[in-house]
Amino acid sequence: MATSATSDSLPSIGTWRVAGAMALTKLALGTSIAFHKGGRSWDAGMLYTPLPTVSFGLVVRNLGRPVVRDSALRIVVASAVTFRPARGAALTAEVLGTERRPVAGYDRRYRAGAQIVLPIRWLVTATSAFEFESRPSGNRLGRWSIGVAFGRLNQLLGVATTAEPEGVARNLEAYSLAAIAKGVTRPGPF
């Protein structure tokens, strides 16, 4: 997979990412390397699926803390649970922790989203997510993302995110375009 994307806090840094994963019985492990204009970083993740309708995930991003535009990218830890109530539908809740720098600790954000697969001639997946920021005054809407993907194993997808500084969509904050190629391994003669 290769993507050109932007960082949450540094727009237009031109990141290219190459990723791979390996699926075991109920556990999948993956990693990616991201090449930024000013350095590179690693991401690592796992997905555990104890039941066909429930899965748990954990991702750690920006390992290595590359320096981009004179600032070290912060480590981000994301954990999620996904529930699939019906074929082609999924509901997800996430908690994200972003490293505080230079002080210790993590700032928290919460996301909730839904995904619907439309079984038409070219498989289309529509995704939407809302992100809530934790503030001393309480949680408030921080961002809204919407995306669409075309294809099943091989996909072309795009995601757009708006900034919500007052709880109202103001402007396009970031976008991401990606092409994903997936393959199925078969046992060989060895």
Image (cartoon, helix red, strand yellow):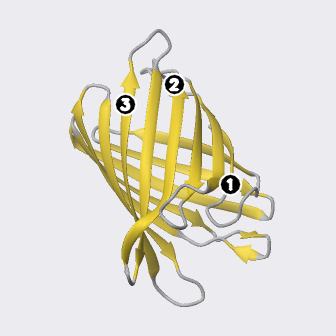
Task: Kindly indicate whether the residue at mark 2 contacts the one at mark 3 (C-beta within 8 angstroms).
Answer: no
Number of dots carrying numbers? 3
**Residue 126 vs residue 43: left or right?**
left
Q: Amino acid at mark 3?
A: Ile
| Earlier sequence position, callout 3 versus callout 2 | 3
C-alpha gap between disc 2 and disc 1? 27 Å
Q: To which residue does mark 1 refer? A: 6
Residue to which mark 3 is pinned: 116
**SS type, badge 2:** loop
Circle 3 packing at 10 Å, graded few (<14), some (14-19), many (20+), is some
- Which sits in the foreground, 17 or 129? 129
The secondary structure type at the circle numbered 1 is loop
SS at mark 3 in the image? strand
Q: Amino acid at mark 2?
A: Gly
Q: Which residue is mark 2?
A: 183
Which one is nearer the viewer's eye here, 92 or 58? 92
Location of the N terminus by quadrant is top right
**Three-letter amino acid code at the position of disc 1:** Thr
Q: Which mark is residue 117?
A: none
Viewer-side residue, 40 vs 185 = 40
Q: Quadrant of the C terminus?
A: top left
Residue 97 place in picture, x, y as percent: 44, 70
